[in-house]
Structure formats: structure tokens, C-alpha cells
């Protein structure tokens, strides 16, 4: 920890941009603002490549959560009266270990499951995967990153042999002449990112694909770019039409395709069926707009002497039953243009959660071991087992992905106990009423968290943990840049790190596997376990990252093996840009894969004629467990709402400011209506940051992508009606209808 009184350089606790910030001890105690205790640190933005010295509202107010009025500071155990009550650490851990041991003895190790989070440090994510597989010996571990990155990861691994969100530094985007951005509202989800779009906007080359005219779509105004507003769930059709135009108009980089890819002929044949006029009938985007965008991207590509172009995807196209296919089409488009593996151009995925990248690289996913190794690979099992000091045969095989895991809870043959670390599944999982029922059917639910989230409030045991400014560790941001998280203040009360909790549980369960509690020591072990893997961290350590930053650096990119390098330091410098020489496939070529459009799993129909799309707002993050505890943010957006077009509002009788009732095949929610022409007349939008009657994930489908197991959060069919009898249309409303018509 930095000496008392000194400022600490660290990173924001929210999204994967991991904006640089400095934490300094707060001033002398004074009257609590708005009833909150004086904060232990003050936040100041600092220069870092991803944020360029900026912060969003969430970052500026992030210290508030450190002293939230209901911060968990002592273990809680549910008593005979059904209420959670304070308990000692010994009592709580003895209870958890005892009940886990009994359940495993009676029903086998598969009776216990683990659910992790994309906000955990690399060290904690690694230790959690190790704990599940060596102490619990259960195959059942997955994490909420399955809801974030799995489709992009599946498509990237298939095409490139390697999955890294952005295979280039985010600052490279500044020089691009064109950027195609699909399914990401970065202006609200990660505002400092917008500065990296300035070059493309100045060139008139920012193309935003979104069924809403979001804050990001508004950046692509006249002279700055193009906003394509497709029917929800048809982004794949847009991409296939763009590829069709490239082939038909001979805009493909044929030399690049011949030298660096395989599979182009099949892809070209599949795109032949999606000429722009046909695509328009499905996606609703005018054929000439599709041609215009394809030509714009081609003009910016290196093969035509352009400044460079990028194709970027986000959750809006990935959280779909055809998410992997959609990302694959985006990759095919980028490869056809000759963008990937060239400095100044490329394809990338915008990771959402703070450590969504690192969280999946070191063992939280059901089928992976540290270093992005496959758990069913005998060589991978042998290597990792050697680091852990266990017999490879003792390691369980692959488990099941998140939705299947959550669906199986409490069911016959399914897990009877669940340990949750850093995830609020009651709010964030699809078809959340079903998830709540599964949690209630468990024999034991243990939740580790910093605040009493909706999931924690259902637990049998709640264990208070440290958070970002109270712990040491590392994170891996959206670029694959490994950075240091540093401790700036002490945790309140009896909050403890998950590293300590896992070590204590392992001891109580009689395991002889070592679980260090020093994050630097844990990272060194992680580095050894990752050595030789796809995500090789073996050349990194806390000391090296600290020294690199002290010398003016800003983190190091994986892969960063320990093998000697030919540079003057004798250390591998990290890999800011992958694929420059070859792809990580056996023959070094990228795989182009033919895909086709199937449409949403829950499409509109007479009893549910309106599309529902979901997303985020600037002021809140994920399930809202953190940001709802920040008064400044809560005041700005205090409740859930539903955006609908005035034409739809008038047709269904839901006035602006009235209460709307949305119903899907899975549930019903109510929210305040906001009229806006930023949404299509056939679509409504709801943010997903709330629980209770306004929790939109009570409506979303738990249908999943067949390749990635990503749930289809982003589109489903609903009916929209007034929550209470609506008043008769006013003269003003009638006039609005006439104008819009």
C-alpha cells in the first residue's frame, strides 16, 4: 500500500475502459453530505491512454460507494426467524464449510456451483477458478462475463485463434478515416471513449448501427457520418448486405484475402443472397444507405489508399441468439476489406465489464483453465495441475454455461448450493423471475459482495468483501492491457478480500492446496499457470508493472511471455498489436466463416407486436448495485422508464409521463413512459439497472446462442398497454399524431 498521505494512481472501478484516476486522502472530517459519512478518498482523473484525462459521472462519484450507508461490514447469517443477522467470521465460515462438506458428501461435488463476476481482479478470478476445481472439485463454475463477451470471444477464437477484445491500442482509432460501430452506445456507457472517434467524425466516416438514435448515433450527424437504424435483431442482415456490395462492386481487398485468409468463396456465396434491396425488406435500412456505407468503408481501407478503417461490435449485436454469427459477419467484413492485422485498421469488440477480458482468461469460464487453456485439453490440464500441485485426473471436466447453470439450480440433479462472487444475478440474468425461483430452491446460497444487492438479500450467508480502492491487484482492460489496481484506503469494519475468504474456506474443507492471500504472490502463480497459453502473462508481475509505470509506461499487453526477448531489457515488451505477422491459427490464416440470418428467437406476433430492446444509461452501471447508492446519480435517473415513439404511445393509449405495462411470454413490468422519436415506432427501449416491478430482465428471454451460450438480452417481443386506464387523447396529442403522420 502507498505510504499514508500519498496519492495513489489506480483505475476506475466500472467499465473496461479502466480510466486512469488518482485517489488522495480526503480532507479533515466534516459534516456528512446528504447523510453520508465523509469519504476516505477524493477522486481526480489522470492522464491515461484510454481516457486522456477524462472521467464520466460514474467515475467522478465512484468513491461514494466506499462508504455507502448500507455497506456490508460484517458477515450475515440467516437465522431461524428467516432474517439475516450479524455473525463472526469464524461462525459464518464454519457454517458455510460445514454445509458444503455435507452436500458434497451426500450428493457429490457437482452439488456445489460457483458463479463469478467480470469485476473481480485477475488474482481473485484466478483463485476462484482454482478453488472451484481443486477444493470443491466441481465442474460447475461460470460467470456473468458469459452475458458480456461470449459471442465475440467465440467468433474471435474461431476466426483468429485468439480472443482479445481490441487487438490494438484504443488510441489507434484516432487516425481512422472510417469506423463502423455496431451495437454499442459508447457515449453513455463509456463517455471518455468518444474522443477516439473524433478523427473518423471529422472525415465524415463514423457509421453507427443502432435501432435507437442514441447519444452515440447522434455523433454521426450530417458531415460526421451515418446512422443506420435497423429493425431490432437484423444487424446480421446489414452486415451481409455490406459484404454483398463489396463483392458485387469489386471493393474486396483480393490480395489480402488470398494471402491471409481462408474461406472467402463460401462467404461470398452466402452474401450473394443479400443484395441491398432484399436486405432492406428485412432490416428496414434503405438499399442506397447500405451501398453508401460499404463504399465509405472501402474508400477508407488501406488497399485503396485510405487512412484506415475499423469495425467494432458491442453488446447490442452480441447479446443475441445469433450473436456469434453476427460478430462473425462483422469479422468477415473486416477481413474482406483487408483491415485486420494491419496497423491503423482492424476489427475489435468493446468489452463491457471492468475485467471482462481478464476475468475469462484465468478460469471463471466453465470450459477454461488459466491462460485461456481449454479444460478438456490433456496438456493444459497437466500444466495447470503441476502449478497447483494436484493430480491432473482430479480436475473436473467442463461445466455448463451461465444460463444453463442458473436454470439448473435446485432442480433434480442440479446444484444444491451456489457461491456467488461479484454478481447480482437476480437483476442481471435473463428471465430473472425464473432465476429467483432457482435460488429459492437451493439448500445453501452464499454471496460475497460489498453492498446488500438483491441477490445478497436472498442469501443464507452474506460475506462482506473489499472493493477497488481497498485492495491490490491487476485488471485487464478492453485492449488486453494489464494494469495495476492499488489500495488507497482501509476497508470498513470486518470486510475481507475474496483471497482471504477462499483460503479460509479451503483450510476448513481440509484441502492441502495452497491459497496465498498476497495478491502479488497470487499473480506470480497465475503467471506460471498461464505460461505457454494463448493469454500468456508469464512475463508479468506486480513489480514489473509498477516499474513500467514508474518509468512512464501505462500497463503491458498480453501475450507477454517470460521467454527472453531480443530487446535491450531482456524482457518481452508485451504485444500492443496482435496479428501483424500471422493469425493464431495453425496455418496463420484467419478463418472466414459463412453465416446466415435467422432472426430473434422471440419475434413479434399478434399478442406481442412490439420489439423490446434493452441497454444502459449514462448514470448507472449494470444491475445498479453500486450506482443506486450514489445520490448524485440517483437524483438524475431515479427510476426505470420505457422509451416509446409518440405514434406508438398514441396508438396503445400510453401518454407521455404515464405508466406503461410491458408483457412478454415470461413476465410483466411497469415503468414511466417517455415519448421520443429516437426509437422506431415498432420498438420500445428500457434500461436494465433496476429490480422489482421495473426490472426489464423479467421480460427478456433466456434463449441462447448455440455457439457461445450468450442469452438474447437485446431483443424480444412484448405487448404495450397502459398500466392504469389512460385518459382520452388531448388536442395536443392529436396534433402530434397528425404532424408525425
Image (tube, rainbow, N blue to C red):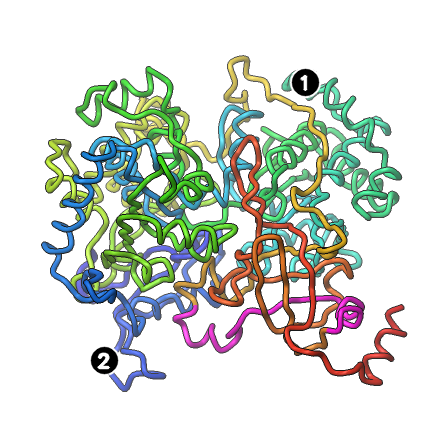
The image position of residue 623, as x and y in percent, is: 45, 59
Q: Does residue 145 appear left or right of residue 565 in this picture?
A: right
**Circle nearer the N terminus (1, 2):** 2
Residue located at (82% from left, 39% from top)? 279
- The numbered mark at residue 92 is none
Disc tally is: 2
Q: What residue span does the magenta drawing correspond to?
A: 628-653
Answer whether residue 114 is visible to the viewer in this image.
yes
Local secondary structure at mark 1: loop
The image position of residue 44, as x and y in percent, is: 38, 66
- The numbered mark at residue 28 is 2
Mark 1 vs mark 2, foreground winner is 1
User: Which residue in the protein does label 1 denote?
Assistant: 263
Q: Does residue 510 appear left or right of residue 470 in this picture?
A: left
The image position of residue 609, as x and y in percent, is: 74, 56
* Vertical relation: 268 (above or below) 685: above
Residue located at (27% from left, 36% from top)? 132
Answer whether residue 49 is visible to the viewer in this image.
no
* Vertical relation: 2 (above or below) 332: below
Q: Does residue 494 appear left or right of residue 667 in this picture?
A: left
Q: Quadrant of the C terminus?
A: bottom right
Local secondary structure at mark 2: loop
Structural crowding at the residue carrying mark 2, measured as other residues with C-alpha within 10 Å and reported as few (<14), some (14–19) or many (≥20) = few
Would you identify the image quadrant in which residue 610 lies? bottom right
Amino acid at each position: 500500500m502507498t505510504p499514508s498521505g500519498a496519492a495513489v494512481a489506480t483505475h476506475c472501478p466500472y467499465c473496461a475502459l479502466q480510466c486512469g484516476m488518482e485517489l488522495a486522502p480526503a480532507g479533515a472530517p466534516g459534516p456528512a453530505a446528504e447523510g453520508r459519512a465523509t469519504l476516505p478518498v477524493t477522486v481526480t482523473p489522470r492522464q491515461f491512454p484510454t481516457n486522456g484525462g477524462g472521467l464520466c459521472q460514474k467515475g467522478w462519484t465512484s468513491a461514494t460507494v466506499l462508504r455507502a450507508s448500507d455497506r456490508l461490514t460484517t458477515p450475515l447469517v440467516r437465522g431461524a426467524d428467516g432474517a439475516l443477522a450479524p455473525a463472526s467470521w469464524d461462525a459464518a465460515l464454519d457454517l458455510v464449510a460445514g454445509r458444503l462438506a455435507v452436500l458434497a458428501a451426500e450428493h457429490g461435488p457437482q452439488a456445489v456451483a460457483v458463479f463469478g463476476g467480470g469485476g473481480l481482479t485477475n488474482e481473485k478470478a484466478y483463485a476462484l477458478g482454482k478453488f472451484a476445481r481443486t477444493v470443491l472439485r466441481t465442474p460447475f463454475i461460470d460467470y456473468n462475463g458469459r452475458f458480456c463477451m461470449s459471442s465475440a470471444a467465440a467468433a474471435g477464437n474461431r476466426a483468429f485463434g485468439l480472443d482479445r477484445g481490441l487487438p490494438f491500442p484504443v488510441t489507434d482509432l484516432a487516425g481512422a478515416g472510417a469506423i463502423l460501430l455496431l451495437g454499442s452506445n459508447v457515449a453513455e456507457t463509456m463517455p471518455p471513449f468518444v474522443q477516439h472517434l473524433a478523427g473518423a467524425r471529422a472525415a465524415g466516416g463514423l457509421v453507427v448501427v443502432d435501432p435507437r438514435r442514441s447519444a452515440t448515433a447522434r455523433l454521426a450527424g450530417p458531415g460526421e457520418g451515418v446512422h443506420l437504424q435497423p429493425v431490432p435483431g437484423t444487424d446480421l442482415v446489414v452486415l451481409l448486405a455490406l459484404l454483398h456490395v463489396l463483392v458485387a462492386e469489386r471493393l474486396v481487398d483480393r490480395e489480402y484475402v488470398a494471402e491471409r485468409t481462408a474461406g472467402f468463396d463460401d462467404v461470398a456465396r452466402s452474401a450473394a443472397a443479400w443484395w441491398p434491396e432484399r436486405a432492406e425488406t428485412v432490416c428496414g435500412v434503405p438499399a442506397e444507405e447500405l451501398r453508401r456505407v460499404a463504399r465509405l468503408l472501402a474508400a477508407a481501407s488501406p488497399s485503396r489508399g485510405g487512412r484506415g478503417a475499423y469495425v467494432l461490435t458491442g453488446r447490442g449485436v452480441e447479446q443475441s441468439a445469433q450473436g456469434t454469427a453476427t460478430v462473425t459477419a462483422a469479422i468477415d467484413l473486416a477481413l474482406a476489406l483487408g483491415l485486420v492485422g494491419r496497423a491503423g485498421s482492424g476489427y475489435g469488440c468493446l468489452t463491457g465489464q471492468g475485467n471482462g477480458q481478464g476475468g475469462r482468461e484465468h478460469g471463471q469460464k466453465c470450459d477454461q483453465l488459466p491462460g485461456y487453456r481449454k479444460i478438456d485439453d490433456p496438456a493444459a490440464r497437466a500444466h495447470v495441475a503441476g502449478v497447483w500441485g494436484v493430480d491432473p485426473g482430479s480436475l473436473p471436466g467442463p461445466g455448463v454455461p451461465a444460463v444453463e447453470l442458473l436454470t439448473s439450480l435446485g432442480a433434480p440433479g442440479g446444484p444444491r448450493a451456489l457461491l456467488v462472487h461479484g454478481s447480482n444475478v437476480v437483476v442481471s440474468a435473463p428471465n430473472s423471475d425464473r432465476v429467483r425461483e432457482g435460488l429459492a430452491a437451493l439448500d445453501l446460497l452464499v454471496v460475497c459482495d460489498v453492498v446488500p444487492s438483491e441477490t445478497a438479500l436472498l442469501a443464507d450467508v452474506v460475506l462482506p468483501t473489499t472493493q477497488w480502492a481497498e485492495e491490490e491487484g491487476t485488471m485487464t482492460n478492453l485492449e488486453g492491457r494489464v494494469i495495476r489496481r492499488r489500495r488507497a484506503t482501509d476497508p470498513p469494519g470486518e470486510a475481507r478480500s475474496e483471497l482471504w475468504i477462499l483460503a479460509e474456506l479451503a483450510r476448513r474443507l481440509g484441502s492441502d492446496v495452497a491459497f496465498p492471500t498476497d495478491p502479488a504472490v497470487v499473480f506470480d502463480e497465475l503467471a506460471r499457470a498461464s505460461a505457454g497459453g494463448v493469454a500468456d502473462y508469464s512475463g508479468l508481475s506486480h513489480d514489473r508493472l509498477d516499474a513500467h509505470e514508474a518509468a512512464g509506461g501505462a500497463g503491458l499487453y498480453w501475450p507477454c511471455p517470460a521467454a527472453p526477448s531480443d530487446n535491450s531489457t531482456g524482457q518481452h515488451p508485451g504485444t500492443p498489436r496482435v496479428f501483424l505477422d500471422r493469425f493464431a491459427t495453425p496455418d496463420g490464416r484467419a478463418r472466414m466463416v459463412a453465416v446466415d440470418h435467422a432472426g430473434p428467437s422471440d419475434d413479434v406476433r399478434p399478442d406481442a407486436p412490439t420489439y423490446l430492446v434493452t441497454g444502459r444509461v449514462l448514470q448507472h452501471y449494470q444491475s445498479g448495485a453500486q450506482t443506486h447508492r450514489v445520490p448524485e446519480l440517483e437524483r438524475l435517473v431515479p427510476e426505470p422508464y420505457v422509451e416509446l415513439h409518440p405514434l406508438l404511445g398514441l396508438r396503445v393509449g400510453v401518454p407521455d409521463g404515464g405508466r406503461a405495462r410491458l408483457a412478454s411470454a415470461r413476465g410483466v413490468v411497469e415503468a414511466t413512459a417517455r415519448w421520443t422519436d429516437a426509437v422506431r415506432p415498432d420498438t420500445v427501449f428500457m434500461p436494465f439497472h433496476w429490480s422489482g416491478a421495473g426490472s426489464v430482465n423479467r421480460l427478456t428471454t433466456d434463449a441462447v446462442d448455440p455457439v457461445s451460450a450468450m442469452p438474447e438480452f437485446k431483443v424480444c417481443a412484448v405487448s404495450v398497454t397502459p398500466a392504469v386506464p389512460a385518459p382520452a387523447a388531448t388536442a395536443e396529442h392529436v396534433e402530434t399524431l397528425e404532424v408525425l403522420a
